[in-house]
Structure formats: C-alpha cells, structure tokens
Amino acid sequence: MQQEAPGSAVISLLVDNESGALARIVGLFSGRGYNIRSLTVAPVDEHGKQSRVNIVTTGTPADIRQIKAQVERLVPVSRVADLTADGPHVAREMAMIKVVSSGEPRTEALRIAQAFRARAVDTTASSFVFELTGSTDKLDSFIELMRPLGLVEVSRTGVAAICRGPQTIQSL
Amino acid sequence: MRPSPSMGEQDKMTPQTASSAPDAQKPQTLPGAEVLMRALDEQGVEVIFGYPGGAVLPIYDALFKQNRIRHVLVRHEQAAVHAAEAYARSTGKVGVVLVTSGPGATNAVTGLLDALMDSIPLVCLSGQVPSSLIGNDAFQEADTTGITRPVTKYNYLVRRPEDLAPAVHEAFTIARSGRPGPVLIDLPKNITVGDAPYVEASQTPMRVAKGTAEPDRDAVKRAVAAMKKARRPLFYTGGGVINAGPKACENLRKLVKLTGFPITSTLMGFGAYPGSDKQYLGMLGMHGMYEANLATHGCDVLIALGSRFDDRVTGRVDAFSPDSFKIHADIDASQINKIIPVDQPIVGDAGRIIEMMIEEWEKEPVYAHQADLAAWWEQIEAWRALDCLRFSQDQAPDAVIKPQQAIQRIYELARETGRDTYVSTEVGQHQMWAAQFFRFDDPNRWLTSGGLGTMGYGLPAAVGAQIAHPEALVLDIAGEASTLMNIQELGTIAQYRLPVKLFIINNHYMGMVRQWQELLHGSRYSESYSDALPDFVKLAESFHAKGLRATRMEELDDTIRAALEHDGPVVVDLCVTEGENCFPMIPSGAAHNEMILGPDQEERGAKVTREGMMLV
C-alpha cells in the first residue's frame, strides 16, 4: 500500500446541540487513536440547537478520509466537511499571551506586538496580556518571539474555520 | 416491525418535544412506565429479555399489568443481551433488553459491544437513579450513557417526560436503519414513575442512521463492467447480506447463478447463499477453507458484499488478494478503504445493490470469458480436492472421539432430523470447527459472536433463538470453558422449558488458547487447562435438564441421537481428545497462500514473527 504523507486537516462539523454530543466526538477520536490538535465548539444557529465543532487533526489523506467517515456515522452529526480538502478556507484562532518583564525586553515585547497587530488587553507596570488573532502559524511565531522576552502564560482558543467564497459547510 | 412513516424523509431533524407542538390536541398523559409499554407495543415488540432491580421496578410493574409483551427472565444481564441478539439475528426484528441501573447496565456492556461489532439491531432499556440523584454516587448509580457511548450506535438519557416516547420511537428507527446496531435508553426512575405524554411514532420527527440512501447507479455499472471483464472472479459476502433481509439472500443466489462465479462467505454471512451449493467455497479467513482462501488470493475481481475485510479474513493486509480489482459494497461508508484500499466502492444496502447488479448484468447478459472462468473453476476444484477438513479418526469402538468427529456427527444427525435448525456457538476451536462443518442453506440460522469473540455467547443465544422459534431445533455448540461463562442460563432454559441442546465439546482446555500457546509460545500452556470442571451431567440434572455423556466412539452417535430426540433441554458432555488443533489455519501475520493444512505442517507455525504474534 502506498503511503501518502501525513499532514494536518481542519474538520468542521455541525452537530445537534444535545448532551453528550461533544463526548461522542471526542470519544471517537481517542477510541480510534486519532489526534486532536485543537478543538473549538459553540452554538451557531439562532435557536441554539446546532453547534459547530472545528477540529484540527493530523494524518495521511487516507486517515483523514477515515476520520471523516467515522464522524459522519454519529447520529447527532448532521454535516462534516474536511475544509483542508474541500477547497480554500479561512482558519483563525485567538490567543492571550502574558509577558512579565521590564526594561529592554519589555520595550521589545511591545514593539513586536505592534508589528503583529496584537492588542494589549491588560497592562501593569510589570506585565502585558496581548490579544492576538490570526492563523496558527502567526500565533506560533509571535509566541516564539515572546519566549525570551518574559513569556509566562498562553491561552489559545483553537481554530475556528470557514470556507472561502459563497460556499457554506451545508453546500460543500 | 412497523417502520415509522417519517423514516427517511425527515432525515436529521432534531426530535421535537410534544409540548412545544402548537395547539394540536393535547397528547394523552400516562405514568412514564406505561408510556414506555405503549411505545414498545407500537414498535411491534413481542419479547423483552431482562432482569429486574430497584431502578426498573416501575417498568416491571407496568409489564405485570399488561399482557401484550412477554418478558423472559434471564439469570445475568449479559445473557439478556446475547439472547436478544440471537432473537434479532434469527427473526430480523429488533431485540429488546431491560436491565436495572448500575451493575445491571454495566453487565450489559459486553453484549452491547458484541451487537455493535456484529451489526445486530437492539434496544436496551436501562434503569437509572432519579434525576435529582444523578451525579451523587447514589446507590446503584452508574454513568450509563458515558459507559455505553462507545459500545452503542447511539444512546439517550431521558431527562424530560416529553422526551420519553419520542426517544423510544427514534431508538428503534436508529437501531434498524442503515447499518443496524444497539441503542440504549437510560431511564431515571422519576421519568418512569411520573406522568409523561404519549406521542405516536408517526408524530415524532426522527433521525435515521446513515446509509439509507439509494446506491449510486453509476458505481454499480462500473462494478458490473469489471465483473464482465473478470477471468478469475470471486464473491466474498458477509453479514450485511443477511441484515439486508431474506429477499437480498434470494437475490444473491440469483446473481451468483447468473454469473456462475464462485462465492465465499465470512463467519457472519452463513446461509445468505446455500452452503450445500457447489458454487459455494465455504468460509474464508484464518480458519477458512483452503479453496476459499486460495481463490481469494488468486482472484482477479473480488466482489465484497456486506463484508468488512476484518483482520480474521484478510490475514497479512499487504498480501491480501494482491492482484484483484476490488469491488466493495457496504452500507457503512466508514468500512470502505478502512483496511484494504478498494477500486470500486458502492455505499448502500447490500440487498438493493445486489438487485441493481442483477439489472445491470442482465442488460447485456453476454459474458466473454467463459473459458477462463471454466479454467478458474478447474483450479478451484483442484484446491477443493485437497479436502482441507480431512482428519483421521480412529474408528475403534473404544477410541477417543476427536472434536471434529463430534461436530461433524452433530451436524449430520441434526440434518437427518429434517427439522428447521438454529445453531449458536461459544467462542474458540469448537466455533471454528462448527463454522467449517456446518453448512446452512438458509439465512438467520447461524448465531455466533464474530467481531467481539465473546465466550459465553452461545447458551443465552440459544435461549433467544428458542424463544423466537419454539418449534425449531436449537443447538449450542460449546466448549467446556466458554459455556461456563454463562452456564447460569440453564436456569432460564429450565424456567421456560426451552428444549435447547447444549453440546459441550469438552477437551479440558481453552482449546484455541492452548493451540496458540503450542504454536507461538513453546507449548507453555499457561493457565489454559480447564481444571476442576463440574460434572456436566449432574450439573444438567440439578438444572432440571437431561444430562448425557459420551467418551468413546461407540457412544457418540447414540448419545447425539438421544439428545436430539429428547423433548426438553439436554446437556451433552462430549469428552474429546485434548490436544487437537483447528486446521486449516493462516498463521497470524501470514498471507492466504501460506496456510497450514494440518499437524504435519505445524512446525511452520514456529516461524511466526513477533509482528504476527501481536496480531493473534
């Protein structure tokens, strides 16, 4: 069997907003040995009856197809899209990054934050909390840059994703 | 079964609660347990297998007060599930189980997973502590929906009275639609005691399982085009055909006759195609027939219908049927390309796909490769002539009986009775021998634990089959170790006077474990000896059944006949040779063309790699 190279994929689901739905999805991933790199979930329709779940996972294209087929079997899941395979999409996440420093490193942290268009949402004499939204790569590189400048804590949301253009998860 | 009229059309709607329905006439309100009875009745339930307890007392009270639904009291909740599985498998209906909270529910877990693996439609009702106590470590509380989530197709915790009837209706729809499977409904005691509105199935918007859509006609066309080009074709069919119903099995016969192709079956697919027909090659896989496995290895077009390329079937995956164009029809899209990459997938009901294949084949009935097919058959016949099930039985009257001899004679003598026969098995060597020697001409007659391999399945399964078919001959081919795992069901058999025939192939070993220890672990028989066995004859008598024993060849036939003729439950202790191994076999990690045919070749087993050892 030829092995295709493993990569990362964003899988988006629409699920009935019922008790245990998330456990079903997460349990499927852990039970079958699939990886969850990030996970976001929130109600998205006007009545709060449906939630959207975005999962960043890794595997070969065959793995990802199998993950998709497995998730599709779940009764409360009404829609599954592999956004990475199904066309161009936008994937963004938000992070809050706490930096505790003074003197030159503190000035440097602020300067880099400006370059990244990160917002300082909390400022004290010895610390900043930066809020940054963007692609996972962008957040990763910002965090790497903050590391020597007094980075003490990171809180990230995980990826929210949507396809580009007029297409929707329903029309894919 | 009365399928809900909303099935299919209302795909994927959230169940609407009765109370939120605008003005419509107010639904009738009844105690929850009675709502449950009514919903079960509406779903066509005739039998429930269960065991009472504190949290389900209101349900048992409602059962007591009605007489449309029959309750069968088992002796352990696991047995309730296996009995319901066999009831479902042998009738095509949904099996129903009722257990109490906590240990009642946890005891059912093995059976639920067994049903999930073998695609058996079940609805399991479990009691739960009152909603107000959930999360408080109450007496006999368990997180039943949490525990059973990975072992069911779907499950519910009914939190509001108005959700009760819709949950029951939807549960039956989900259990039987798409790829069938078990569904659990957890019922807190306040829900069954308190009042709840009754909603009819027709008034309940329901979700259905995936796989109910019409198969893609073009995919079928491409599959049939490949079948037309085949020179060495092979059908490989499984339990999906049986789940598709009797008509699917009839059509399979038609398709196989129409094409003239050979056919092999998985353990779960027995009887979908007549076992006595000459186009049938028998079971494939680890202990499959030589001709079936070599045909699988050598075919150029493999037509998989309702089968899932289980590891017991494929052997070494990268050497599985290496040169074939693979067609895979399955109702469950996640089975496609899961283990073996296929060339032509078709998602849908096996019965419908077979129908479409017949239509497409008949559109242009010319098959250009008859000569090649004839040569293929010649090759298959040569393989078949090897007679891979051959064993040598000393025919002296005082000779020790070989297990193969015992099972073959049970089969032959049961067939001589001319009675409609259902056969269940436990798990192990006896199961594989039964799979090799028993041939079924009809579907739904073979009841075995395929995917999960649950020791202790057979006796409760025989209970379920006999309850469903009171007039039929029901046999459990058992091993002495397996059968002890649910031997308490002799009590159920006695209570309901079920004339089940339990044949214990007693070799004083967990035979399959012993066989693997011999082949892979230097004959170090670690903990596989069945020590301190009961006297099965006395055990039978203490459970009000007839007990028989055969230890020598001269006793074998008479003992089997006596058991078959007895109008009541019988336990037969067939004392057989201890060291017999089950052949043919594909050593784990090997390919289909590397089968071991018999003990003479056994040393080859020593060559099993460490990787193969892990696959056992």
Image: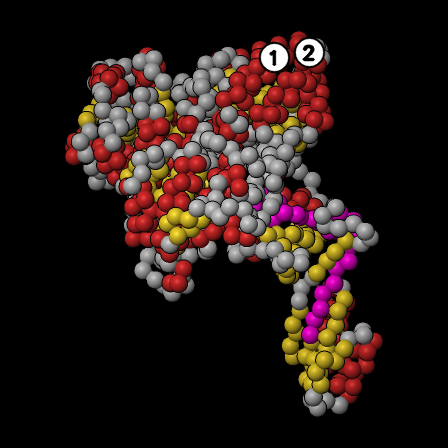
Q: Which chain does the residue under circle 1 lie in?
A: B
Residue pointed to by mark 2: B365
Is residue B392 something one can see in this rendering? no
The residue under the point 39% across, 48% down is B30
Quarter of the image holding residue B331?
top right
Disc 2 from disc 1: Cα separation: 9 Å
Which numbered disc, 2 or 1, marks the residue that appears first in the sequence?
A: 1
Residue B579 quadrant: top left
Camera-side residue: A93 or A15? Answer: A15
On residue A12, the disc is: none
| Residue at x 64% of width, y 22% of height | B356
Q: Nearer the viewer, residue B387 or B198?
A: B198
Q: Which residues are drawn in magenta? A: A71-96
Helix, strand or loop under label 1: helix
Along the horizontal axis of the image, is B474 left or right of B450? left
Magenta includes B222? no
Q: Residue at x 52, y 56 (%)?
A: A19
Q: Given the image, on which type of amino acid does mark 1 rest?
A: Leu
Left or right of B293: which side holds B32? left
On the image, the x and y values in percent for residue B367 come to: 69, 11
Numbered circles on residues, count: 2
